[in-house]
Amino acid sequence: MAWNPYLLKDNKFRGQSIETYVQGAERVKYFKRPVIPMIKTVPPEVVMQINEERIESAKMPVEEPKTKTQEVQTIFRDGEAQTNPYTPEYIIDKENVPEVLSIANLQFNKGLPASMAEMELIEQMREKRAFENALPPTSDEACFVLRRKLMEELEVREWNKREEDIKRLQNERLNLLQSALVEREKETEEKHAQRTEEIRLKKTENKERALAKIQRKRIKVLRKMYKARKNVEIKGQKRDIIEEYANFGSTVYAPITRDGLSLDKKANKYEVQPEALSSYQGIEELSRSLPPKVF
């Protein structure tokens, strides 16, 4: 390695490390920093002194409550659950046929859950099975005839029961049909009543509108007639001066301002009762002054 011109040539530094005698601006080139990955400094956890009472209370067992309230959220709704039970495959023993197979046709929403009708059907099936087991065998002719008679009676009872069921179903259907007809009639009547009420309200509104229009027209015509009559009376009526002066409520004494200045408004300034008429001698003088043709 070539020596830098800034290296000291003194012999006392020959046996020492280069860090002790390298001087100058090039000193940094003779040092190397190791590559150390950066580690995030984690602040130390400061644990304060815990009170002894708290330590003892923490060691004591905590009594759990007898009842708890828990919340559970299901993934599937009830509508997505399977309602029909699973029926595995089975093998029937011909000697011992289970009773449950006689009602295998009943399913969920089709006879299940069982009602009184299904319970009566199950009881009838049990009676029929017990009756068939109690029939006499067909070993001889007498037993055969008795067996045939009993089976005919059983068949007649079943047909009668079936007819009763058919009549009952027919009556139920008739009742349903009758209630449906009554409901339909009620809805029809309500619709008709609502429509009639709407028509009545509309007609009433039209009538009130027409009456209001007629009333406005009537008032307008009356005003025109009043103005026309007033103009006719003013133009056609002749003024009676004596009547106006005799009536203290006439326009002579109380003129109307909107008519303008009245000529008789200052009539009180003119003398209408001369002094000559206040005495008999004055009257004689006035009569003498009149021309003879007046008399």
Image: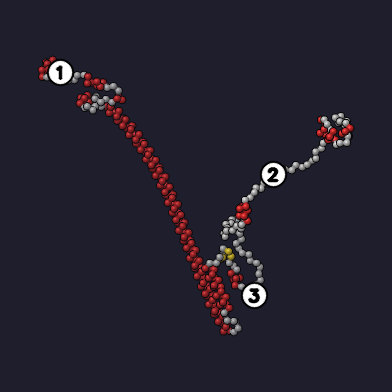
Which type of secondary structure does the marked residue at label 3 adopt? loop
Of the numbered discs 1 and 2, the one sitting upstream in the chain is 2
Q: Nearer the viewer, mark 1 or mark 2?
A: 2
* Residue corresponding to mark 3: 94
* Residue corresponding to mark 1: 275
Query: In which quadrant is the C terminus drawn?
Result: top left
Of the numbered discs 1 and 3, the one sitting upstream in the chain is 3
> Disc 3 versus disc 2: distance between alpha carbons?
84 Å
Which type of secondary structure does the marked residue at label 1 adopt? helix
Of residue 174 and residue 76, the one placed in the foreground of this image is 76
> Disc 1 versus disc 2: distance between alpha carbons?
136 Å
Give the image location of residue 27, x and y in percent: 82, 33
Pointer 1 with pointer 2, Cβ within 8 A: no
Count of numbered marks: 3
Tell me where residue 99 sits by quadrant. Answer: bottom right
Using the image, determine if residue 286 lies above or below residue 184.
above
Neighbour class for label 1 at 10 Å: few (<14), some, many (≥20)? few
Of residue 202 and residue 114, the one placed in the foreground of this image is 114
Furthest residue to the front? 12
* Residue corresponding to mark 2: 43
Name the amino acid type tagged 1: Glu
Q: Residue at x 28, y 27 (%)?
A: 234
Query: In which quadrant is the N terminus drawn?
Result: top right
Which type of secondary structure does the marked residue at label 2 adopt? loop
